[in-house]
Image (spheres, rainbow, N blue to C red):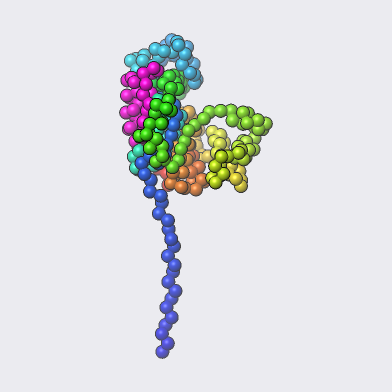
Amino acid sequence: MAAAEEEPKPKKLKVEAPRALSENILFGLGNPLLDITAVVDKDFLDKYSLKANDQILAEDKHKELFDELVKKFKVEYHAGGSTQNSIKVAQWMIQQPHKAATFFGCIGIDKFGEILKKKAAEAHVDAHYYEQNEQPTGTCAACITGGNRSLVANLAAANCYKKEKHLDMEKNWMLVEKARVYYIAEAATFAREQGFETEDIKEIARKTQALPKVNSKRQRVVIFTQGSDDTIMATESEVTAFAVLDQDQKEIVDTNGAGDAFVGGFLSQLVSDKPLTECIRAGHYAASVIIRRTGCTFPEKPDFH
C-alpha cells in the first residue's frame, strides 16, 4: 500500500517586529513657554486692555500681568510653546519609553523656569534648556472668561537660544546624534515667499515637494493641515487628501493646540517607521483629543489603535 502523501505545510510568514523605541529617538528645538491658565474677571481684562477672545504678544503695559495672574487667581501651569507642545504630545502618544522625546530651548533662571522644568519632566520629555539670566522665562497667559480665551505671550528668554553655548556642547550634541527624527517648527507665509502664485493648497503642496533638496537620497514629504478641512500630503508621485475625524462641534473646547497636537501624533508614529498614512491618522487622533480640552493638555493615556 502506497504511503499517504504528506500535506504540504503552510509557509510561515515572516513578520517583522516593530522597531524598538529608545530614549532620545525624537528631537525638537524651539521656543519654550510656560503656559499659565486661569479663569479671570472682566476687571482683569480691562486693566490690561485685553479682548475676551484674542491672541497678542505682550507689550510693556503687560509686564506685571503674569505675576498678578498667579497672585490673584487659581492658575494651572503647563509646558508650552509650539514645538514643545508637539514634542510633549508625541511623548504622550509613545508612552514608553519615557524620554523618547528630547527638547532644547532657552529659559530664564527664575521661578517660572523652575516650574517649566518640572512640568516638562512630568510629561516625561527629556528637556535640556539653555538657562541664562538676561531675560526671564517665556510665558503665555491664558485668561479665561466664560467660553473665551485671551492669550498673552511674552517670548522673552525663548528668543535667546545660543547654539554655541548649548547645542554645540558635547553632552548636548550627543543627544542630537542619538535622534532619528528631528522637528523644528517655522512659521512663514511660505507660498507667498516662494512666489508660487496660487492659493490652491494641493498645488502649493505639490510645488513645495518639488523644491530643490540637498539630500536627494530621501524624498521630501509635504503635509499641510487646514483645521477642519482635509489634510493634504504631497509625495514625489502624488498629492493626497485625508479627511479629518468627524467632531461634534459641541465637544470642541479650544482649537489653539490642534496643529501642534497633529504634529506630535504624526511624529509619534514616524519614529517607529509607520506608513505615512498611519502617521496622519495618529495626527488626526491627537488633534481630536486636544481640541476637546483647554490648552494643549491630554488624559493620562491615549486610546489610539
Name the residue at 39% across, 12% down. 64
Vertical placement of residue 181 versus 1, above or below: above
In magenta, the rendered stretch is: 107-136
Name the residue at 38% across, 39% down. 24
Picture quadrant of residue 233: top right
Total labels drawn: 0
Vertical placement of residue 100 versus 73, above or below: below
Residue 225, horizontal then vertical, whole percent? 54, 35
Residue 266, horizontal then vertical, whole percent? 47, 40
Residue 136, horizontal then vertical, whole percent? 38, 18
- Name the side, left or right, on which 280 lies relative to 20: right
Residue 198, horizontal then vertical, whole percent? 66, 32
Picture quadrant of residue 208: top right
Vertical placement of residue 13 versus 85, above or below: below
Name the one closer to the observer, 159 or 1. 159
Q: Residue furthest right?
A: 197
Name the residue at 38% across, 26% down. 130
- Name the side, left or right, on which 24 lies relative to 189: left
Q: Residue furthest bottom?
A: 1
Q: Is residue 59 magenta?
A: no
- Name the side, left or right, on which 3 lies relative to 241: left
Residue 119 visible? The answer is: yes
Q: Is residue 112 magenta?
A: yes
Residue 241 visible? The answer is: no
Name the residue at 61% across, 43% down. 239
